[in-house]
Structures are given as C-alpha cells and as structure tokens.
Amino acid sequence: MALLAGRTVLLRAGVRLGAEAATRGGNGARRFASHRVLVEPDAAAGIATIKLKNPPVNSLSLEFLTELIICLEKLENDKTFRGIILTSDCPGIFSAGLDLREMCGKNPAHYAEYWRAVQEIWLKLYLSNMVLVAAINGASPAGGCLMALTCDYRVLADNPRYRIGLNETLLGIIAPFWFKDNLVNTIGHRAADRALQLGLLFPPTEALQVGMVDQVVPEDQIHSTALSVMSQWLAIPDHARQLTKSMMRKATADHLIKQREADIQNFVSFISKDSIQKSLQVYLEKLKQKKH
Ligand SMILES: CCCCCC/C=C/CC(=O)SCCNC(=O)CCNC(=O)[C@H](O)C(C)(C)COP(=O)(O)OP(=O)(O)OC[C@H]1O[C@@H](n2cnc3c(N)ncnc32)[C@H](O)[C@@H]1OP(=O)(O)O
C-alpha cells in the first residue's frame, strides 16, 4: 500500500482515498487528516492523538479501516512519535464496531477483502511499537471494544450509556479466536468465558471491576487523563518497553498470523450462510427501527 501525500491514491484493496490534507497545528506541528481519521500531533511530546471520525457511529467500513491502517503505518514509521491516544470525534460513540453493511448482501471476494482489513488493523494496533492509550469517550461494542483491547491502557468516560464489550453472540455471530485471545489476555479466562457467551456490554463501573478498562474518569477529564497516563508510559526506555510488549503479545499475534488465510476462509464461509445473513439483516433492521 502506498501513500502519496496530497494526491488521491489507489490502494491494493481497491479502495480509492481522497487527498490527504495537511495543515499546521497550534504548536507548529504538522496536522494531517484523511477523510475519516483525524491526527493531532504533538511533536514536542512525541504523541499523536487519533480521532475516529466516521459519523454517525464510527462503524468500521472497509474504507475507514484502510484509512486507519495507512495512518498507523505513517505514525509507526515516523520517529517523532512514541505514543498514540486513540479516541473518537463522534459524540457519545467510540466505535459501533464492524460495519454490518460490509458483512451483508456482498460477495465472497468482498467478505475476504474486508476480513483481511479487519485482521490487518488488529495486527497493526496489537503489535504497535508505540504506546497506545484508548480514551474511550463513547459506546464501544464488538469491533470498537476490540480496538480498545489492543491498546496498552484504557480510560473510559464515566457515562452509563458508554457500554463496552464483545457482544457478537447477541447478533448470532461468533467472536473469532483472536478476539477471544485478546479478551482473555485482558480480563482472564473465566470472565472472558462468561462475557463472550452472554455477549455482555459492561457499563463503566462493571467494565472497571472486570478489568475491561483500567480507569473510569469524568467525561471532561478523559483527554487529560490519557495524556498523564501516556507520560508515565513514555518515561520507560523505549527498547525495554517494546521488547517486553513483544514478549507479552507475540504468541497471541502469531496465533493469527500463522493461519490468516484459513481464518479468512472460515469467516467467508460463515458469513455467507443464509442463516447468518438473515440474523445480521434482522439485527440491522432492529437498529434502524429503534428510532421510529
Ligand atoms: C467466524 C466469523 C465470525 C464473524 C465475526 C464478526 C465479528 C463482528 C464484530 C462486530 O463488530 S459486529 C458489529 C457489532 N456492533 C453492534 O452490535 C453495535 C450496533 N450499534 C449500536 O448498538 C448503536 O448503534 C450504538 C453504537 C450504541 C449507537 O446508538 P445510537 O442510538 O447513537 O445510534 P443508532 O441510531 O443506533 O445508529 C445510527 C445509525 O448507524 C447505524 N449503525 C449502528 N451500528 C452500526 C454498525 N455496526 N454497522 C453499520 N451501521 C450501524 C444504525 O443502523 C443507524 O443507521 P440509520 O438508521 O441512521 O440508517
């Protein structure tokens, strides 16, 4: 995948991205943004804040995932940055998870391309050399929760509507083994067993209790808390922290890396089943009707 600043790029995945905008931030640092991924760099501190902006609910469409992957690659390769704060620009929503429309009524080639992008974003985030702090400022079901789980530290805003969890079973689908592995590594086997089977979405107090998040803070303190956590983590020498992170995460990532193609085939055959398509359509319809 190539990124040509200021031009439209055609990606291997076949997704056309608009021109990248570059402006100067308040501290003189270069601020860059794709359509849906805003990056606010603080070069002096070595921190970039990524704001997800795919309204209304930051659902992870193929295009959105592709923009995010490119953005992470850029930051990972830029020695200026040692830490990322991952947050949302959509009020009240961190991310609604995978875009259900990418998994409904499409062909097997599309499902395969989509799932490869989902795997890729997980691997990029989970194996990042940088410190990743999730500032979860909204609801965070399923794939939204997964993105947060890849981070080194999670701060959740204290609002009972901001529930977080892997609720796949409620949709009649099954969290793949690498979602499960990431959850088990975070909250332990027994809590993950219960949470996954019941598709639990935890409000802040329970999310903290079970260990899904590390801290719950008033909403107006979420960014300052993320910054202060980041400075603690950045005080550790990079090489020592990075090698330790890799030691802790490599086996889990390798589990997927070794069977990426089989995992894609499994997803495509599962999601193509008539019964699964029907469940997803019913779920989407329910979401749409909720307002009326
Ligand atoms: C072996 C293979 C196994 C397969 C594994 C696949 C794993 C999947 C993981 C996933 O991530 S699946 C997605 C799961 N996500 C959810 O269940 C969240 C669903 N959404 C919500 O609960 C709510 O939308 C919200 C996030 C709590 C926000 O609520 P709010 O009231 O603010 O907004 P809504 O009115 O509900 O939604 C606005 C608008 O967005 C559409 N929408 C919501 N979520 C999604 C989504 N995930 N994908 C696509 N579209 C979504 C919703 O339908 C509304 O659309 P309109 O009616 O405005 O057209």
Image (cartoon, rainbow, N blue to C red):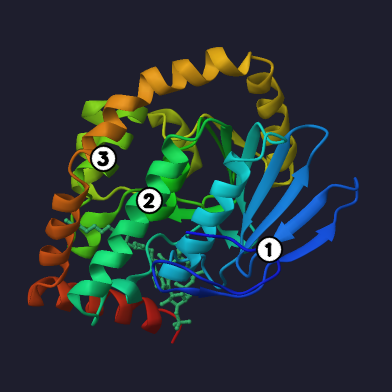
Kindly identify the residue that appears in the image at 30 percent across and 53 percent down: 167
Quadrant of the image occupied by residue 274 = bottom left
| Dot 3 and dot 2 residues touching (CB under 8 Å) | no
The amino acid sitting under disc 2 is Glu
Q: Which residue is mark 3?
A: 257
Disc 2 target residue: 120
Query: In whole angstroms, how far apart are the C-alphas of marks 3 and 1?
Result: 30 Å
Along the line of sight, the residue nearer the viewer: 79 or 135 = 79
Residue 105 position within the rendered picture, expressed as x and y whole percent measured from the top left: 23, 82
Q: Helix or strand or loop: what does disc 2 sit on? A: helix
Q: Would you say residue 77 is visible in this rendering?
A: yes
- The residue singled out by tag 1 in the image is 5
Mark 1, Cα crowd under 10 Å, few <14 / some 14-19 / many 20+, is: few
How far across and how far down the image is residue 241, in percent?
Answer: 54, 17
| Percent position of residue 126, x then y | 42, 37
Position in image of residue 225 (x %, y %): 70, 33
Residue at mark 3 to residue at mark 2: CA–CA distance: 10 Å
User: Which kind of residue does numbered mark 1 sit on?
Assistant: Ala
221 or 161: nearer the viewer: 221
Q: Residues within 10 Å of mark 2 (few under 14, many from 20)?
A: some
Horizontal arrangement in the rendering, residue 161 relative to residue 282 (left or right): right
Q: In the image, what residue occupies the spot 12% across and 57% down?
A: 266
Answer left or right for 178 relative to 47.
left
